[in-house]
Image (spheres, grey):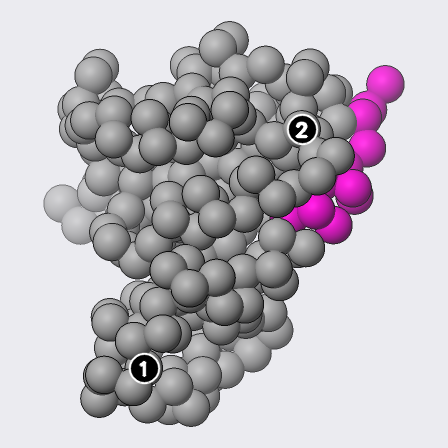
Amino acid sequence: MHRTRVRIVADVLDANDTIARANREDFDAHGVAVVNLMSAPGAGKTSLLARVLHELDGVRVGVLEGVVQGTLDAERLASLHVPVTQIETSRGFGGECHLDANMVRSALPEVPLGELDLLVIENVGNLVCPAEFKVGEHHRVMVCSVAEGEDKPLKYPLMFRACELVLVNKVDLLPHLEYDLDLFLRHLDAVNPHAERLLVSARTGEGVDGFRDWLARTAAGAVAVG
């Protein structure tokens, strides 16, 4: 029984990786840099995007918005006059708590890849499953708010290992919380010492320019294939 379950999981991930490679080929063919943005619910992914997207001068950016249900986040980002395509996992995907490569592929006909330099895939809020499923992205970024506690890298190591950039959000709350930022960073180093990290506040704008510049460099690094 145990070996059967492991085999099924392996088969699912193998099939997902095959579709993810097809997605990557499409992104590369259009010269679009793709960022998979992940976090727990409420960490501030949408708020950070709302802060930076309109400041990416000269970068043609779009968003693929993943959510279990509802259009609030998509509407908020669309108000910034960037193309937003939404995937509601409750519609045809069983209400999954993550995006997988097949979900992303199903939405690509609605994404204007030929008009973009950068596509941000805002994944469903979850600290486990999104890290397991590649979707064809070039880069993985996660947001971890100070309100979540210092122990998250140790409790959810796969998510932190999977990302090359960690945004520590809501630092404006530090004076009001019993939160040890140095301890969090030590835990992060223990799990992924190579991850870049930025201290940011979507509410005040502190440090957000660093994320904006990182996205701009990522977009500039994309080169079309063929």
> Around disc 1, counting alpha carbons within 10 Å, would you say few (fewer than 14), some (14 to 19), or many (20 or more)?
few
Give the amino acid type for the residue marked by disc 2 in the picture.
Arg
Residue shown at the point (65%, 42%) measured from the top left: 56
The residue at which mark 1 appears reads as 174
Instruction: Work out how far the residue at label 1 is from the one at label 2, CA to CA, in angstroms.
Output: 34 Å
Q: Position of residue 186 (x, y in %)?
A: 44, 88
Query: How far across and how far down the image is residue 57, in percent?
Result: 70, 39
Residues at marks 1 and 2 touching, judged by CB atoms closer than 8 Å:
no
The quarter of the rendered structure image containing the C terminus is: top right
The answer to whether residue 8 is visible is no
Residue 60 bears which disc, if any?
2
Relative side of 133 to 138, left or right: left
Outermost residue on the right side: it is 226
- Outermost residue on the left side: it is 1
Which region is colored magenta? 215-226
Q: Where is residue 222? Give x, y as percent.
A: 76, 37
Residue drawn at (68%, 55%) of the image:
213
| Residue 198, above or below 10 | below
| The one of 131 and 38 positioned closer to us in this rendering | 38
Q: Is residue 121 magenta?
A: no
Q: Which amino acid type is marked by label 1?
A: Leu
